[in-house]
Image (spheres, helix red, strand yellow):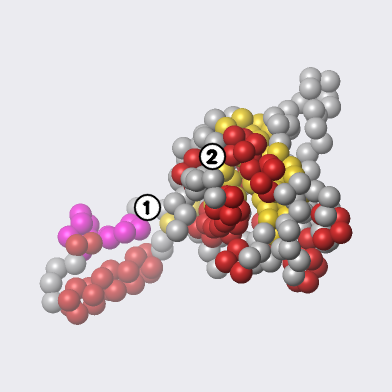
Amino acid sequence: MVTMVNTAATAARQVVLDTETTGLDPREGHRILEIACVELVRRRATGNDFNRYLNPEREIDAAALEVHGLSGEFLRDKPKFAAIADDLLAYLRGAELVIHNAEFDLGFLNHEFQLLKRGHPKVEELCTVVDTLTLARRRHPGQSNNLNALCQRYEVDNSARDQHRASLDAAILAELYLAMTSEQTALFADDGGGKKKRAAQAPSGLTYPKTPVVRATEAELAAHQAALARLAAAAEEDCLWLRLEGGGGAGEGEGVEK
């Protein structure tokens, strides 16, 4: 089980990470074939990214190939994971990782490091982790929280996402994370002349409307009191809320956000 950190305590350096793989389960021998990282320092993209295609040294499942479109022929001359492992660890060390469905990507990364038999620690022992899927489920319970759904919800441009590629998905996730955790949506800094240093993959321009406050009506308060009285009777003991001054219970004189 991966321990997720509280996003309120944001690290100065964050790495938004995504992978593409040959299949769904590393325990079945599946491997990473693309890894992409976008570096944020104080919530700004630095351009110091880490993007690699990898030779997975095995066949790619047909279902996975349909998702990302990265063929074995294209990957045949790419480096193997062993060749980039030390550079990747040095890049990730000490960062706060931002990952969508973190257990999937960390499971594959840790599997790759274990295959090397070099005594590498688990990635989550070197970094803290924010799982944006967990964050999205808390904020939008009962709704779809995949990247496409979140892009629509937060008005992030995902028009280039006709296939899953780690480099594009990491850039989109960086935009989404900033939108989900604050009102900041400009991922790339302006150069002072009206041009951005690097074109944002997913501009958003979000605005956040004021949350309406709806107060309970007299009838609703009366119904609430009656419900509390029934609970107290069923429990055959005093109800804590009924002891409050005025007997109004939760909601009397206080707004209920909807």
Residue 65 seen anywhere in this rendered image of the structure: yes
Q: Which of marks 2 and 1 is in front?
A: 2
- The span from disc 2 to disc 1 (Cα, nearest Å) is 38 Å
Q: In this view, does 65 lie above or below 207?
A: below
Residue drawn at x 32%, y 69% is 224
Question: Which residue is disc 1 drawn over?
Answer: 254
For the residue labelled by badge 2, is the local secondary structure a helix, a strand or a loop? strand
Residue 40 location, x and y as percent?
Answer: 64, 34
Give the amino acid type for the residue marked by disc 1 in the picture: Glu
Q: Is mark 1 on a helix, strand or loop?
A: loop
The reply to whether discs 2 and 1 touch (Cβ–Cβ < 8 Å) is no
Please state which of residues 248 and 172 is positioned toward the viewer in this rendering: 172
Image: magenta residue range: 242-252
- Asked if residue 26 is positioned above or below residue 109 in the image, the reply reads below
| Amino acid, disc 2 | Glu
| Front in this rendered view, residue 38 or 149 | 38
The answer to whether residue 159 shows anywhere in this view is no
Direction right: furthest residue: 73
Q: In which quarter of the image is residue 96?
A: top right
Residue 45 in the figure: left or right of residue 228: right
Q: How many marks are shown on the rendered structure?
A: 2
Using a 10 Å C-alpha cutoff, classify the residue at mark 1 as few (fewer than 14 neighbours), some (14 to 19) or many (20 or more).
Answer: few
Residue identified by numbered label 2: 96
Q: In front here: 169 or 159?
A: 169
